Image (spheres, grey):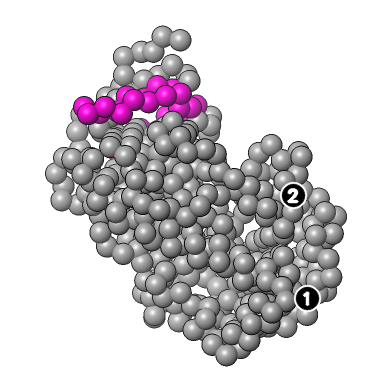
Amino acid sequence: MDHADPTLCRALVVGGGMAGLATALALGRTLPRGQVPLVLLEQSEAFSEVGAGLQLGPNATRVLHGWGLESALRACAAYPEALSVRDALSGAERGRLRLGERARLQYGAPYATVHRADLHRLLLEAVRADGEVDTRLAQRLQSYQDRAEGVTLHTEAGAAFQAPVLLGCDGLWSRVRAQGWGDGPPRFSGHLAYRGLVRMDEVPASARRNEVTAWLGPRLHAVHYPVRGGEWLNVVVVVHGDLPPQAHAWDNAAHRTDLRRALGATCAGLLELIDRVPEWRLWPLYGREPMTGADQHARGRVALLGDAAHPMRPYLAQGAAMALEDAWTLQACLNDGAAPDWPVVLQRWAEVRWPRNAWVQARSRRNGTVFHARGPLRLGRDAAMRLLGERLLDVPRLYLGPPPP
């Protein structure tokens, strides 16, 4: 296919998910205005977000508030009062962390829970309201060339773009990463996530609380929390298992009978809640090893943000938060208002971001081992929660972020 002359851009963002919209929003508010557009390319024919809920710790809500999105978040989020950790077999509470007002006082920002689609829509509306970003749909990356004078990108639809920087925000199966880094695809973790939503007035009374509840069991755990202003309950169950033969995508229909079988002899309270969820989706969890250096974030005029750079297991609830932090930190690196020297800016940004993202990746993995523990490790975990209480469950190093560049 012959390509047209390239469209000149101030910057190119590939991917219209959470990371891409956050990055486009940050750049649109920071880069010097000019005659050429800031362009975001999305391969789908419409902006959309599937999935269920997200937890947003104070580090994530701090970023959103800093972008002036506090009211928009408040209109769609829930603000749980506590985290309750329970034994999935007995139902007994093992630990408790106060959130709510304590999070606001200690960290200066709230702990929120939100539906993925609501956060995506919030960011998209902010990008559109600013009017600084030219969003192009149905533009799937075909190839790009990173040269000293800039990056030239071609799409499968025959469009071409040229910019001083390319920011790959195209998720777990990133085409930007595949071409520029060539380090292989993500690997299946051996864990399967079942996700569902149920109206709050249809859940058992014991689960009808403004809390995040985590149920820890052998080789499994479940988490549920309110979303959409508390009108719905988001439920996630993670179990060990083989990759289903029909799982050709990251999001698949699932059956309650399979989930009940995987849960085994868990307590009646958890099983009753599982039975109230009308529809389940199955996400095989893929990932990568924790980052080992700035080179995995940026090379020359090309950078990876969000899941394209550092996919995370969901056991610290920080995947979306780290994408927001990536964008916020990049914005902070640009705040001198001058035309960026992009290789220098990206290198500085990558040196700031990779250690924190690597730490969160590793901490998330460790949490998975602890959550799913059996035998002596499980007994030690429960004893530690009884002894240390909130000190064990709180994560100040995480929630006080993002660190300044």
Above or below, 124 against 105 in this view is above
**Badge 2: few (under 14), some or many (20 or more) residues near its Cα, within 10 Å?**
few
Neighbour tally class for label 1: few under 14, some 14-19, many 20 plus, Cα within 10 Å: some
The residue lying at 62 percent from left, 80 percent from top is 381
Residue 1 percent coordinates (x, y): 46, 10
Q: What is the chief secondary structure element of the magenta stretch? A: strand
Q: Are marks 1 and 2 in contact (CB under 8 Å)?
A: no
Residue 304 is marked as none
Amino acid identity at mark 2: Asp
Residue at 55% in and 73% down: 80
Disc 1/disc 2 C-alpha distance (Å): 23 Å
Query: Mark 2 = which residue?
Result: 242
Which numbered disc, 1 or 2, marks the residue that appears first in the sequence? 1
Whether residue 401 can be seen here: yes
Q: Taking 30 as reference, is 267 left or right? A: right
Residue 157 included in the magenta stretch of the image: no
Q: Considering depth in this image, is 352 or 73 the residue closer to the camera? A: 352
Dot in front, 1 or 2 = 2
Question: What is the x, y in percent for residue 42?
Answer: 46, 33
> Magenta part of the protein: which range?
130-155
Of 208 and 256, nearer the camera is: 256
Q: Is residue 154 magenta?
A: yes
Query: Percent position (x, y) of residue 286?
Result: 60, 48
